[in-house]
Amino acid sequence: MARITYDATTANSFRAVREIPRDGLAAWEGAVRRHLDPSPGMTVVDIGAGTGAFAAAFCDWFGARVVAVEPSEAMRALIPARPDIQVRAGHAAALPLPDAGADAAWLSTVTHHVPDLPAAAREIRRVLRPGAPVLVRNAFAGRYERLRIVRWFPETARVLDTYPSVEETCAAFAEAGFAPAALEPVPQTDIASLAELLERADALRDADTLMRSLSEQEFTRGKERLREAVGAQDPAAVDPAAVDLTSSLDLLVLR
């Protein structure tokens, strides 16, 4: 699949159009809390932290201290500077943490970028304390029907089908001694209307790996679908609740 090299421009684009506002992540706070058993001061390693949206959320939600590990210098530069976030260069198979030094690992939309998932699982096992959970937020091959992007740009499914499946992910982590503990879809909301999604489509194509995989014709067809849906919505006649603006990713928990 195509990979994005994050220079300052693409990193800022990522933050502008792909970071989800905190109020759109309410369901994620609840889902993570159920499986993390958080306590103030616990150490969470955020692997592939991007621009730090979840690192900051974990600090604010749970009083955690986060080690935000991110390979891109441009992305690291945008992670919030705050005393409870330690920003480090690194990647999933080379984590800059001591043995048994973390209480949980968080991987958000990362596993499909990891070239050697079993090696990453072994490294995560090294840095976690015994019994600590691995929380994986991702789309998985064969489980993307709840993704909004697929509703409007169905050709993105061909890339999603190259992502590790739940079974493949569990098998990779099983080699390091982890077993699956939970799997659940979690909804999130980052737009207020389909018109907003249409307005942001061009910027999303620059910042989103899935959107960048589309041909010009596929991208144009998707925008036309959105344009027709937006034009058909009469605010006076259509119940806003009938328009599904959510998008769900899976939370896979391993212990």
Image (cartoon, rainbow, N blue to C red):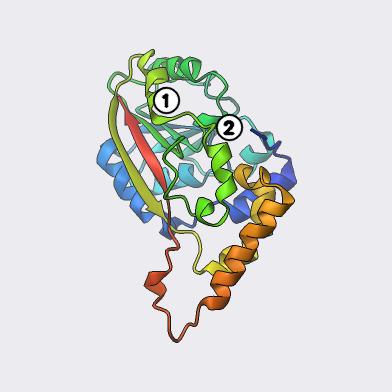
Identify which residue, 54 or 177, lies in the foreground.
Answer: 177
Query: Vertically, is 107 above or below 80?
Result: above
Q: Which mark is residue 156?
A: none
User: Is residue 76 visible in the rendered structure shown here?
Assistant: yes
Amino acid at pointer 1: Thr
Left or right of residue 177, residue 172 in this image: right
Residue at the location (43% across, 48% down)?
Answer: 145
Read off the residue under disc 1. 169
User: Is residue 12 visible in the rendered structure shown here?
Assistant: no
Callout 1: SS: helix
Instruction: Say whether disc 2 or disc 1 marks the residue closer to the N-terminus.
Output: 2
Identify which residue, 101 or 5, lies in the foreground.
Answer: 5
Pick the quarter of the image with the C terminus. Answer: top left
Residue at the location (60% across, 27% down)?
Answer: 89
Disc 1: CA contacts within 10 A as few (<14), some (14-19) or many (>=20): many
Left or right of residue 41, residue 152 in this image: right
Q: Which mark is residue 70?
A: 2
Amino acid at pointer 2: Glu
Point out residue 101 in the picture as x, y percentages from the top left corner.
Answer: 39, 21
Query: Vertically, is 183 above or below 121?
Result: below
Disc 2: CA contacts within 10 A as few (<14), some (14-19) or many (>=20): many
Pick the quarter of the image with the N terminus. Answer: top right
Point out residue 69 in the picture as x, y percentages from the top left corner.
Answer: 54, 30
Report, in whole angstroms, how far the alpha carbon at label 2 lies from the one at label 1.
21 Å
Residue at the location (35% across, 17% down)?
Answer: 174
Q: Quadrant of residue 104?
A: top left
